[in-house]
Amino acid sequence: MTAKEWFDRARDEGWAIGAFNVDSLEIFKAVVMAAIARKSPVMVEFSPGEVGYFGLRNIVDMTMNARLESEIPILLNLDHGKPKGAVLEAIKLSGEDGSFDNVHFDGSDLTILDNIQETKDVVEQAHKKGILVEGEINKVGGSSEVHLEDLNLDEVRKSYTKVDEAKSFVGETGVDIFSPVVGNLHGTFPVQPDLDIELLKKIRAVVGETFMALHGGSGIPAVQVQAAIKEGGIVKVNVNTELRITYKQALDEKIAERPDEYKIYDLMPDVICAVAAVVENKIDVFGSAGKA
């Protein structure tokens, strides 16, 4: 099945695919392990920092190998790709095998007119190779780390996506997936804003057949994520920070237990299992278990 077919099925059946950011081989293994255990399709995704760490070609090869070995649907996404040239490079690497299933062009730093034009350019090139394109208007706040500061919720609300702008952006760019801001933030915070499900439903109503993605899936209560899926039409939920937190905590524990161990690969099985448990939990929340 293609990525579009998976998203169509998810929307029709009322569940979502987890899009898990990968910043180490161990996290990659954990995502694949969890997908196999829960018989779930998953998306692995790489943001600019992660691309810089692995290299685009290595990302493609690693994902294609895992697809063959696991026999589980593993979709590949370029997350928050920018500038446009970097996204086009990922598209160029994708041949008939469709190595990248989705590219996310993040034009939120641009003026709305430049964002629309550059997103249109990406859509034109991606669709020639059957690759889906995700776009956004408003910048998702925060960063993929543990935040200790309190949020100014009034300021956060000013970043929420406006319904008319979403309709215009989707109509003019032809994106396949739209990423709104409705209270979702990157990272975790002491007090997380509630998702504005009513706003999400209004956006869903105006974007037609365009799919919807929820960024900043870490730290959002499961009941709110499920409401975003069931009521707001979300078919893709991004998760990053919770994986990083679990990875670091598990690794710290193993090093403390075995301070004289220098074979790092001997420390990693328990770390991988810890991260895989988080991914399995997310898969259950998203409703994708047993769908593969």
Image (cartoon, rainbow, N blue to C red):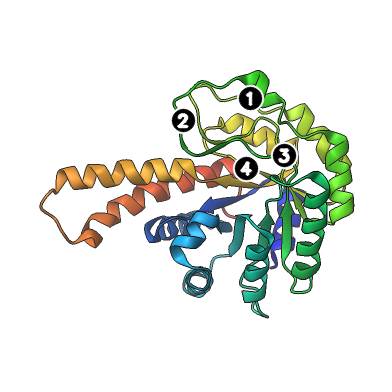
Amino acid type of disc 2? His
C-alpha separation, residue under disc 3 versus residue under disc 2: 20 Å
Left or right relative to 292: residue 6: right
How many residues crowd mark 3 within 10 Å: few (<14), some (14–19), many (20+)?
many
Residue 73 drawn at (x, y percent): 58, 65
Q: CA gap, disc 3 to disc 1?
A: 18 Å
- Label 2 – label 1 distance at C-alpha: 17 Å
The crowd level at tag 4 (other Cα within 10 Å; few <14, some 14-19, many 20+) is many
Query: In terms of secondary structure, where does tag 1 sit?
Result: loop
Q: Which residue is mark 3?
A: 138
Left or right: where 115 falls relative to 291: right
- In what quadrant of the picture does the N terminus appear? bottom right
Q: Does residue 4 appear to the left or right of 144 in the view shown?
A: right
Quadrant assignment, res 120: bottom right
* Mark 2 or mark 1, earlier in chain: 2
| Circle 1 Cα neighbour tier, 10 Å, few/some/many (<14 / 14–19 / ≥20) | few
Indicate which disc, 4 or 2, sits on the residue closer to the N terminus: 2
Q: Disc 2 designates what residue? A: 147
Give the label on residue 194, or none: 1
Depth check: 209 or 231 in front?
Answer: 209
- Name the amino acid, label 3: Asn
Residue linked to disc 4: 215
Tell me the mark number nearer the camera, choosing from 4 and 3.
3
